[in-house]
Image: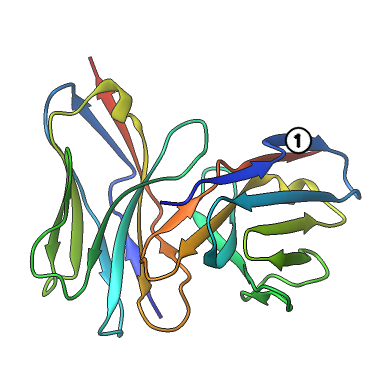
Amino acid sequence: AQKITQTQPGMFVQEKEAVTLDCTYDTSDQSYGLFWYKQPSSGEMIFLIYQGSYDEQNATEGRYSLNFQKARKSANLVISASQLGDSAMYFCAMRKLQGAQKLVFGQGTRLTINP
Amino acid sequence: SAVISQKPSRDICQRGTSLTIQCQVDSQVTMMFWYRQQPGQSLTLIATANQGSEATYESGFVIDKFPISRPNLTFSTLTVSNMSPEDSSIYLCSGALARQETQYFGPGTRLLVL
């Protein structure tokens, strides 16, 4: 079974600072993918970034980067130069890359950016 | 990426009634899924919608309560049957394109059952 753990229920950061959201995972699969989604108060789930278990380099998408440490089973999201619009819930998720494609989600971290 | 729309965006329903949520994608996704997000909680998969056949339900979810259809590659419906206040949640549809790893989500349907 797969499990995602996000240990930070809430984070408060000053605008323009960088922020790291923690995510650890547990799986017995050799091939898997890790995802981060942003959920603003509107409720939609916005895909941010993806990291495959066999990818040797950390994924980056604009201001988002994923700090992937396979041996430690962690996949932290780093947001650089935070903006007020970054305030939202952030979910880490994973799925195995063969077979069933269902996503398993962590409990989320509520990020608040202060002006 | 895939653009996914859902209808309705929100609804308030009386207990004992049923609501059907529609999900439309703009590309031929290989997989479609329905998730539930209860208030203050994370997302939980209800079922995988299979084209032309019965959906595959996760533990704790049954077809009589959450019947799902997927008549073609780009359209699916989820019905929440015989609703109770415990069904008040956000229901999200998602899709995965062929040869892509990412699942994209619709905007969600906010359901309040009184």
Q: Of all residues shown, which one is farthest toward the top? A: A115
Q: Nearer the viewer, residue B25 or A30?
A: B25
User: Residue visible at 63% across and 69% down?
Assistant: B47
Q: Position of residue A47 (x, y in %)?
A: 37, 48
Q: Quadrant of residue A14?
A: top left
User: Residue visible at 19% across and 54% down?
Assistant: A76
Q: Position of residue B66 (x, y in %)?
A: 76, 63
Q: Nearer the viewer, residue A88 or A100?
A: A100
Depicted B108 relative to depicted B72: above or below: above
Depicted B46 relative to depicted A29: above or below: above
Q: Nearer the viewer, residue B20 or A84?
A: B20
Q: Position of residue B38 (x, y in %)?
A: 60, 49
**Label 1, residues with CA under 10 Å away: few <14, some 14-19, many ≥20:** few
Depicted B86 relative to depicted B62: above or below: above
A44 left or right, relative to A90:
right
> Which colouring convention does the figure follow?
rainbow
Depicted B35 relative to depicted B10: above or below: below
A42 left or right, relative to A83:
right
Q: Quadrant of residue B75?
A: bottom right
Quadrant occupied by the C terminus of chain B: top right
Q: How many marks?
A: 1
- Amino acid at pointer 1: Asp
Q: Of all residues shown, which one is farthest toward the left? A: A57
Q: Of all residues shown, which one is farthest toward the front? A: B27
B8 left or right, relative to A81:
right
What element does badge 1 sit on?
Answer: strand
Q: Nearer the viewer, residue A49 or A115?
A: A49
**Badge 1 sits on which subunit?**
B
Circle 1 residue: B11
